[in-house]
Amino acid sequence: MTRHAIAGIPRVDRQLIAALLALFLGLAALPFFGSALIVDKLTLLTVYVTLAVMWNLLAGFAGLVSVGHQAFIGLGGYFALRLVESGVSPFPALLVGGALVLLAAWPLSWLVLRLRAAEFAVAMWVLAEAIRSMVMFDPLIQGETGRSLVALNAIDPDLRRNTLYLMGLATAGAAMALSYALLRGRLGAEARAIRDDAEAAASLGVSTMRVKRIIFLISALGCAIAGTIWLGSAITYQPRTAFGINWSVFMLFMVLVGGLGSYLGPLLGALLLFALQEIFGDFGAWYLAGVGVVAILFALYAPRGIMGLIADRTGREPLSMQARLTRQGEA
Amino acid sequence: MLDGTAQALIQGVLLGGYYAIIAAGLSLMVGVVRFINLAHGDMAVLGALVTITLTQVLGMPVLLSILLMLPLMGLLGWVMHAVLFERAMKGGLLLPILVTIGLGAALQNAMFGIWGSDTRSLGADIGSLAWEGWFLPGGIILGKLPVIVFCVAVLVIGGLHLMLRRTKLGRAIRATASDREAAEMCGVDAARAHRAAAAIAVALAALAGVFLAMRAQVTPYSGPAQLIFAFEAVVIGGLGSLGGTLIGGIVLGVSQSLGGLISAQASLLTGHLVFVAVLIWRLGRDWSADHGGWHAGLVAQLARRVGRRESGAEQ
């Protein structure tokens, strides 16, 4: 009888992983020689990478398209702000504030994960608005006015910049490593099975609710921490920006253009969005309109994004999370 | 105090008329085309801005501008469905969400590029209609404009209902909704039925946008909030039911209006909370129906938990 086993990681992929690790270490050393401007810009890039990886985990692997994950970005920022105001040192407050969104995400998951695809998407958006209305009630935020992280201003600018950058880099690295471990493991296989055919997966004993909930919570946490790091560099907290629908548009753009459901796609998408912003950002509204148009074009004509195009050209997707079977010992 | 509450209640019901109009198109699309257009609110804003431009820049009478704008927006809906939505719907459940959120971003920012960030209103162009009202006993004021909007809402919902029940197009739309292939075998042009529904939905959104611009102000970024209100009204009233959408709009309007008695911020929050409460109630009802009632379901759930723990202990 022929037996099958899951194949090891192909050589090309191993080289890619090694290259990514080298890049990560190189970027970690950047504060020692990079200029302040570059460190600032790259902090934003790490935020984008984290957001894209998290949204891809949710949409690409669990089949949950959310247009309301700004709920967690805004709420994480709010918790961080509250912690700082109550005397917690700013940097830990950013991380803890982000982690606290799980208090909201966990009960919400019971509600929203029972909805169908499109209802889930919009319900998340409505919930983001509802949470924003509640946050605006806090006298500290004063409605639309917002509030600054004054405590961060008191820290030496170089120290602040470099710490935020390293936190952002570590978060992005952790997001990529964690999603790699998850997707290569049992959860990844279960998630793909659900995405492709929920009923068939359930009949094989996969708890669809459990898998979706784990991925939903991880994505909420990741988005929240990315959001607090962004808040750290922006300093001013305004409910309208922090809970803005633009976050969802950006996440969707990065993942869709890079490659929905591929591992490297979000990274590519984040780099692309970052580059576009650098080049065309001055055009303001027209640039954002262009982002929307490009997202539509990719959705309609290349729904698997750039990684899909690469896979079609070369025959395989770089660093694919799909497990391959090999035949093993006929003897 | 009591007068204030009664006044808020009536205002809320009338406000519900506006929500019903903007939700009617969304409800039609969700119910018969099974498609949620996340740019629905932006269509409303576009309709409003086009009407404002026709009136204030070209100097047309408001009514003429509206009558000119509605077919244009309907055409836009038809074309969008033919070019974008049909293709997106073929790509599965996720693509329509991605395409229409992209469309929303493109529209909002393009409108900002064209019309700028100024808030705009039709309030100054409709004369005394903007502020006139009837005085009822008990000091209650009934604004003319809200009453007109509410009557239009009832006409729109009733008209849509009659259209779906009585006309050839309505039958084609319903047949396509229940079984597309069977409908096509009977000679129904399913693609045409869907495009017609999209045209109606966009025109209704635009009409709602005009009413919004008459009683308040619009900016290029007002759309998402309108979509959220429309979605809330549709869900509160029950997905896919047009009569429910009118009730949903009224419930939303009344909740916001009563919340507004506390503070302006509480108004929106109350609406959201009512939406969440209805959602919890509906999901709970479905859950209990799936599990043979609340009691049986909870007992079964508990038994499973305990069973799992015991079998875990044995291993």
Image (spheres, coloured by chain):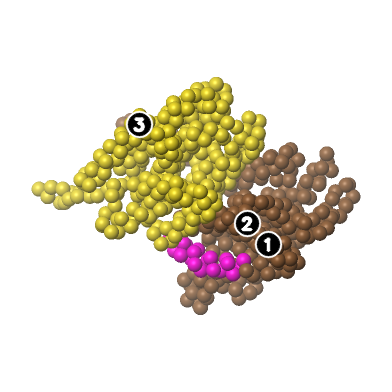
Q: Chain of mark 1?
A: B
Whether tag 2 and tag 1 are in contact, CB under 8 A, the answer is yes
- Same chain under badges 2 and 3? The reply is no
Q: Residues within 10 Å of mark 2 (few under 14, many from 20)?
A: some
The image quarter containing residue A51 is top left
- Tell me what residue is drawn at x 22 percent, y 50 percent: A325
Q: Which residue is mark 2?
A: B115
Q: Is residue B269 magenta?
A: no
Q: Which chain is yellow?
A: A
- Tell me what residue is drawn at x 50 percent, y 45 percent: A247
Q: Nearer the viewer, residue B185 or A243?
A: A243
The stretch of residues the image draws in magenta is B73-93
Q: Chain of mark 3?
A: A
- Residue A36 visible here: yes
Measure the alpha-carbon separation of dots 2 and 1: 9 Å
Q: What secondary structure is found at the residue carrying circle 2? A: helix
Q: What secondary structure is found at the residue carrying circle 3? A: loop
How far across and down, in percent of the image, does residue A66 sit?
A: 49, 48
The kind of residue tagged 2 is Trp
Q: Which residue is mark 1?
A: B53
The image quarter containing residue B271 is top right
- Same chain under badges 2 and 1? The reply is yes
Tag of residue A33: 3
- Residue B302 visible here: no
The answer to which of marks 2 and 1 sits earlier in the sequence is 1
- Is the magenta region chiefly helix, strand or loop? helix
- Tell me what residue is drawn at x 60 percent, y 76 percent: B168
Q: Which chain is brown?
A: B
The kind of residue tagged 1 is Thr
Q: Residues within 10 Å of mark 1 (few under 14, many from 20)?
A: some
Tag of residue A200: none
Q: What secondary structure is found at the residue carrying circle 1? A: helix
